[in-house]
Image: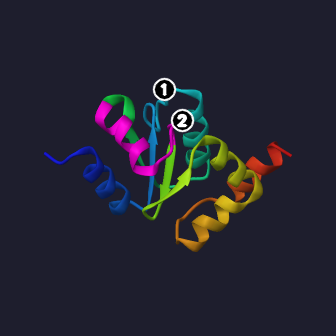
Amino acid sequence: MTDAKTQIDETVKANDVVLYMKGTKEMPQCGFSSRVAGVLNFMGVDYQDVNVLADEAIRQGVKDYSDWPTVPQLYVKGEFVGGCDIITEMTLSGELDTLFEENGITYNKDAAEKIREANA
């Protein structure tokens, strides 16, 4: 069995977009995870969700891996992007669209615009 760091490293490198969260994309277990999963789901992003509540080693391991103290954590193309506040800001500013475009991640641009319009 691999250790948590190896498992996390393999997951973020094997998937274009990964969200470490409390719960699942279908059933988030905290408000912050729900917000980020909601943005990704609404924008139609294909992503791997990892429920940190299912494995304490992964829950702590992802914090150590990114040197970021909280969950959720979003990774794009193997790189740590940020947590809930950062993803919210990037969504509203359009930076998340740019990040997805630069990395060849498919998403619904109209949905991204609707999020920004609703929060203007």
Q: Secondary structure at mark 2?
A: helix
For the point 31% across and 30% down, the residue is 56
For the point 29% across and 57% down, the residue is 10
* CA distance for labels 1 and 2: 7 Å
Q: Position of residue 70 (x, y in %)?
A: 52, 37
Residue 70's disc number: none
Q: Position of residue 63 (x, y in %)?
A: 43, 42
Q: Position of residue 59 (x, y in %)?
A: 37, 35
Q: Main secondary structure of the magenta part?
A: helix
Q: Secondary structure at mark 1?
A: loop
Residue 4 placement: quadrant: top left
Q: Are marks 1 and 2 in contact (CB under 8 Å)?
A: yes
Residue 29's disc number: 1
Lateral position of residue 117 relative to residue 77, left or right:
right
Residues packed near mark 1 inside 10 Å, few (<14), some (14 to 19) or many (20 plus): some
Query: Per the image, is 69 magenta?
Result: yes
- Residue kind at label 1, given as amino acid type: Gln
In the rendered view, would you say 103 is above or below 113? below
Residue on which disc 2 sits: 33
In the rendered view, would you say 76 is above or below 63? below
- Residue kind at label 2, given as amino acid type: Ser
Lateral position of residue 50 relative to residue 97, left or right:
left
Magenta segment: 55-72
